[in-house]
Amino acid sequence: MKRIPTIVLTLIVGFLPKLALADDSLHSTLDQANQNFASAILAKNIDHLVGDYTHDACILAPSTPRTCGLEAIRKFWSAVVDSNPKDVKIGTMNVDSTGDLAYATGTLVITDASDNVSNNNYVLVLKDVDGVWKLHLDTWTPN
């Protein structure tokens, strides 16, 4: 009877490294996507930005109305890139997932055309769409 708990514990501990690798892999994937997103803002690549969202995604940005759907998201990012930001840095802090949903939290630092720096925290909710994590809810708030 004492062998069963030992076997169960051995099995659980045996899976922990695999679970940690899965979390590390998701963190790396989402962090790389964030870096690509920041680069796309600076390159004014609207198609890349819009392509990172689900068809029914929403952006909840500070001091702006709720922005939902790809057409509205395209207009939102067009206005952002037209403001000529000088730098965008996105830091990925925490990630987790369950099923076809994931979230990420982190920092967003934007330097605008006048060298004003805006420090923000963000929360992203992502959906797995055909094996690709896409933004479903994108929100940030100033520090």
Image: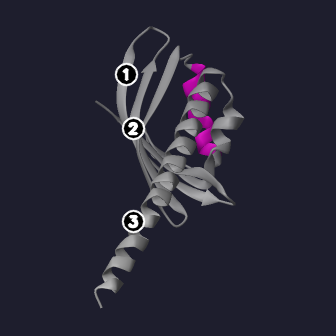
Q: Earlier in the sequence, mark 2 or mark 1?
A: 2
- Which mark is on residue 41? none
The spot of residue 13 in percent (x, y) is 39, 65
The spot of residue 72 in percent (x, y) is 59, 43
The spot of residue 14 in percent (x, y) is 45, 65
The spot of residue 137 in percent (x, y) is 48, 51
Q: CA distance from mark 2 to mark 1?
A: 14 Å
Image quadrant in which the N terminus is located: bottom left
With 12 as the anchor, is 69 left or right in this view?
right
* Residue 16 vs residue 61, the one in the foreground: 16
Q: Which residue is mark 3?
A: 13
Q: How many marks?
A: 3
State how the image is colored: one colour
Where residue 107 sits, quadrant-wise, is top left
Q: CA distance from mark 3 to mark 2?
A: 30 Å
Q: Is residue 104 above or below residue 45?
A: below
Image quadrant in which the C terminus is located: top left
Q: Residue at x 31, y 81 (%)?
A: 5
Q: CA distance from mark 3 to mark 1?
A: 43 Å
Q: Which residue is mark 2?
A: 106
- Label 3: element kind: helix
- Which mark is on residue 118? 1
Q: Residue at x 39, y 12 (%)?
A: 116
Q: Residue at x 35, y 85 (%)?
A: 4
Q: Are marks 3 and 1 in contact (CB under 8 Å)?
A: no
The magenta stretch spans residue 81: yes
User: What range of the chain is rendered magenta?
Assistant: 71-82
Q: Are marks 3 and 2 in contact (CB under 8 Å)?
A: no
Q: Nearer the viewer, mark 3 or mark 1?
A: 3
Amino acid carrying label 3: it is Val
Q: Main secondary structure of the magenta part?
A: helix
Q: Residue at x 47, y 15 (%)?
A: 112
